[in-house]
Image (spheres, rainbow, N blue to C red):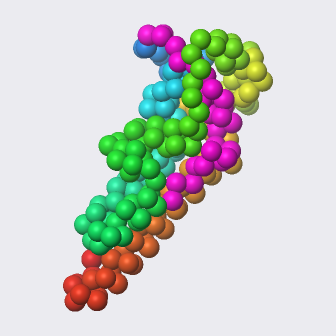
Amino acid sequence: MNRFSSSSPIFALVLVAMLIPACGCGQKTVDLTSPEAAYESFRAHLLRGDWEGVFPLMIPEVKDNITRTWQMNRKTASLIESSIPAALKQNYLSEIGSAEIRNAASPQQYFGALMRSAFPVSLVPGDSRHSVETSISRISETRKGSRNYVVTTIAGRQINLVLNQDNTYGIEPPDDQARLFRMNYKAASELYINVKAVVDSLDSETGKAPR
């Protein structure tokens, strides 16, 4: 059910992020009303491989999609645990994803588990190259007066920053990559429907009322 395989094109910037070394930098409070500061906060979490820290910096649409997927997975897991025969239970649970994905206690933890599952690449401490490559080369408004910006890094990668309703900036993934989040929610919804159909069939065989 987890559609984020290591070959998926989710976040072009995330493909690089798992190669970024951990650092001993202390976490600082930042003003996310500045696009520069919002990007630097995003970059700092990536430098530490801190996916849970990245999650709050995403645009609301992405956070909402991740939250709904997490909720659907929990609903499916609960139904499997309570209603699927023990001999089949693990097979159905594995359709949701890894144990870390299934057991995530919050959307933020689910996002982190999802990213680690998609990109299980070891960090390389002591290599400062990626820190330099992710530094800002330039930042420009996407359209005059839009107050939305694109950051271009020294390595030439581009990251979009969108102004949220609360006047903070959020990271916006490209359309094709955001589509993968939506596909993951669709897959989670379909899995729940399939599991419920199995449970209803089992209930009918044993004379229980449909759930």
Foreground residue among 58 and 90: 90
Q: Is residue 2 magenta?
A: yes
Quarter of the figure with residue 192:
bottom left
The outermost residue toward the right is: 156
Q: x, y percentage for residue 12?
A: 68, 36
Please tell me how many numbered marks the rendered image carries: 0
The outermost residue toward the left is: 208
Q: x, y percentage for residue 82?
A: 25, 66
Image vertical order of residue 111 relative to residue 92, above or below: above
Whether residue 35 is visible, yes or no, is no
Q: Residue at x 46, y 61 (%)?
A: 95
Q: x, y percentage for residue 191?
A: 46, 66
In the drawing, does residue 168 fall left or right of residue 77? Answer: right
Quarter of the figure with residue 173:
top right
| Quadrant that contains the C terminus | bottom left
The dominant secondary structure in magenta is loop
Whether residue 143 is visible, yes or no, is yes
Q: Is residue 164 magenta?
A: no
Q: x, y percentage for residue 200?
A: 32, 81
Q: Which residues are magenta?
A: 1-26
Q: Residue at x 29, y 68 (%)?
A: 86
Q: Residue at x 41, y 65 (%)?
A: 92
